[in-house]
């Protein structure tokens, strides 16, 4: 399944683009595919096989934690967003 | 969690104890002299009881404790006791009595001692609560700040706020709600600046500012509360001056301290709403957790580079930890100091936060609650994702692993050995980069 993946500025250091394409039958497979395309990708958002707790992944605007997590199934044309927490405000 | 003994530390001088009261000409606080004279206290009378006191909002009364003060009030204003207490002997459940902002239920009840110059407030618990159309979830908890009561607007106020008042969603009643509200802003920086300015212009009754930093020239690229002449000045002070210059109607309370687990409850407790414009994860989690424990609506916003995120957490309906259960380890997500931020982005995100709090106060529209608004300034796109309360949230839910449950406030800096996103090494790197920039600039 080919899906569109949107990343925020922090991850763009690795992908070089804000929107990238990836493939996989599930979110987990998609992340493995992205890691092949963009080495180091998974390290930014995962640790020991699970997502960092400050990173959320949304499938068509729904948090995958409330779907089937990394086993959430994907279909062609789906849109994935990867959003880490941001701290900025005052400084 | 016992927050029954919270009070603003009057000794620090950073919080003006009379700031919440509508009468700015209160006499200076005097301490009991130890003589035989009965202490004389200043009693704030809310609107519903003012017909008994010839419409005076502040009256003098004498007594050694609250019960004696109430008896004295009844002597001076016959019928006062019956109006407040009904027929019973006890303070009815819908009446709260405060001595210097502290509810007497958390002290010694009606036997709470008072001293010369103390402020006593008798507040019906429902005063200023939910207005028509306000969702019950958005009604702030009954904080310790005796609610500002606004009577009829003055002609000047009608003029000043006319563009609000002519809107059917606001009207004179809505404008009064705004003027009776208190909002705490965490951080007088990039986000705090536009938030504070628009809330000041809107006529918010009391604006609290938490910031212990001083104004640096590098702040002036985005922090519209501060100007060139403010460099070196405490940010909270500079913020107060700017706010009052915009609108002298507003009461400004400055909290010139870092917010920590020791003071978070007492700083936040007196306010109706909290707006987060913190610049670090430690403060973000601390404020979120304190708002959860105190049942305060939290309007959250954050920024980095060209990205912004905004949402609203209403009591009992989810929190920041539902979204992000734990802060990232140091260095995983850069801070604005390291990565930079577009100045104008702060304006966009901050004004959205200000808009959301005004909607909650007015009880109009659809709040951002349950939605995380994502702003991408480079593509000029707004998107939103749905967020919901996590029943397994480590703070507001029941985590699978009960030992993970957050039961009190946490100072993340303390156990991480350094502020999030500001490891010493990175701070050094940022400082080096800044020096390099300065050197380059001086060469050119």
Image (cartoon, coloured by chain):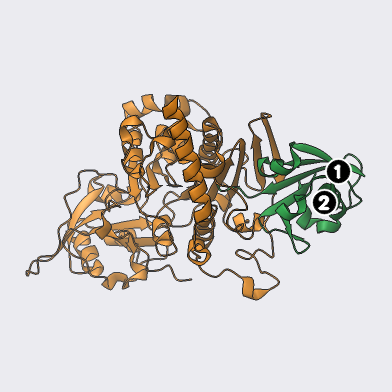
Chain colours: A green, B orange
Give the image location of residue B225, x and y in percent. 39, 35
Residue closest to the eye, B364 or B217: B217
Label 1: element kind:
strand
Q: How many labels does the image show?
A: 2
Quadrant of residue A20 within the rendered picture: top right
Chain letter of the residue carrying label 1: A
Would residue B190 be seen by someone viewing this image from the given angle? no
Check disc 1 and report the residue beneath it: A22
Residue at x 52% of width, y 54% of height: B425
Give the image location of residue A88, x and y in percent. 54, 45
Residue closest to the eye, B89 or B347: B347
Residue at x 31% of width, y 41% of height: B233
Label 2: element kind:
helix
Residue B95 vs residue A87: left or right? left
Residue closest to the eye, B129 or B359: B359
Marking on residue A31: 2
Residue B213 vs residue B427: left or right? left
**Up/down of B170 relative to A86, above or below:** above
Give the image location of residue A22, x and y in percent. 86, 43
Quadrant of residue A6 within the rendered picture: top right
Residue B310 vs residue B283: left or right? right
Give the image location of residue B210, x and y in percent. 40, 49
Classify 10 Å Cα crowding around label 2: few (below 14), some (14-19), many (20 and above): many
Q: In which quarter of the image is the C terminus of chain B?
A: top left
The answer to the question of whether label 1 and label 2 lie on touching residues, with beta carbons closer than 8 A, is yes
Would residue B401 be seen by someone viewing this image from the given angle? yes
Chain letter of the residue carrying label 2: A
Classify 10 Å Cα crowding around label 1: few (below 14), some (14-19), many (20 and above): many
List the single residue furthest toward the front: B443
């Amino acid at each position: 399944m080919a899906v569109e993946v949107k990343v925020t500025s922090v991850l763009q250091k690795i992908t070089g683009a804000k929107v990238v394409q990836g493939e996989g039958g599930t979110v987990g497979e998609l992340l493995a595919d992205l890691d092949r395309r963009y080495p180091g990708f998974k390290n930014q958002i995962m640790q020991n096989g699970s997502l960092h707790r400050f990173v959320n992944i949304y499938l068509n605007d729904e948090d995958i934690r409330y779907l089937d997590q990394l086993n959430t199934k994907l279909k062609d044309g789906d849109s994935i967003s990867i959003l880490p927490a941001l701290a900025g405000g005052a400084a | 969690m016992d927050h029954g003994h919270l009070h603003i530390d009057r000794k620090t001088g950073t919080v003006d104890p009379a700031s919440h009261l509508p009468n700015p000409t209160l006499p200076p606080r005097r301490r009991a002299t130890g003589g035989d004279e009965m202490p004389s206290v200043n009693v704030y009378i809310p609107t519903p009881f003012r017909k008994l006191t010839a419409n005076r909002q502040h009256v003098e009364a004498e007594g050694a404790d609250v019960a004696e003060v109430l008896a004295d009030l009844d002597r001076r204003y016959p019928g006062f006791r019956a109006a407040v207490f009904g027929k019973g002997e006890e303070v009815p459940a819908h009446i709260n009595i405060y001595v210097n902002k502290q509810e007497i239920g958390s002290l010694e009840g009606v036997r709470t001692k008072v001293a010369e110059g103390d402020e006593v407030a008798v507040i019906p618990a429902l005063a200023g609560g939910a207005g028509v159309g306000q969702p019950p979830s958005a009604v702030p908890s009954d904080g310790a700040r005796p609610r500002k009561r606004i009577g009829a607007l003055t002609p000047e106020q009608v003029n000043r706020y006319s563009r609000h008042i002519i809107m059917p969603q606001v009207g004179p009643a809505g404008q009064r709600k705004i003027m009776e509200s208190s909002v705490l802003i965490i951080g007088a920086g990039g986000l705090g600046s536009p938030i504070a300015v628009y809330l000041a212009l809107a006529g918010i009754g009391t604006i609290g500012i938490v910031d212990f930093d001083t104004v640096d020239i590098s702040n002036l690229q985005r922090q519209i509360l501060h100007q060139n002449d403010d460099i070196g000045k405490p940010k909270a002070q500079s913020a107060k001056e700017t706010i009052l210059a915009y609108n002298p109607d507003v009461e400004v309370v400055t909290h010139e301290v870092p917010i920590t687990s020791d003071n978070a409850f007492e700083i936040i407790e007196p306010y109706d709403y909290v707006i987060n414009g913190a610049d670090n994860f430690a403060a973000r989690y601390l404020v979120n957790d304190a708002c959860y424990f105190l049942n305060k609506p939290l309007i959250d916003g954050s920024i980095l580079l060209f990205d912004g995120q905004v949402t609203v957490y209403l009591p009992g309906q989810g929190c920041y930890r539902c979204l992000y259960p734990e802060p990232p380890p140091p260095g995983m997500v850069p801070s604005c100091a390291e990565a930079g931020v577009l100045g104008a982005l702060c304006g966009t995100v901050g004004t959205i936060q200000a808009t959301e709090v005004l909607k909650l106060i007015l009880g109009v529209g659809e709040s951002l609650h349950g939605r995380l608004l994502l702003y991408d300034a480079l593509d000029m796109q707004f998107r939103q994702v749905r967020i919901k309360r996590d029943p397994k949230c480590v703070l507001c839910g029941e985590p699978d692993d009960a030992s993970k449950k957050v039961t009190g406030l946490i100072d993340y800096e303390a156990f991480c050995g350094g502020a999030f996103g500001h490891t010493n090494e990175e701070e050094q790197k940022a400082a080096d980069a800044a020096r390099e920039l300065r050197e380059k600039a001086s060469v050119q």
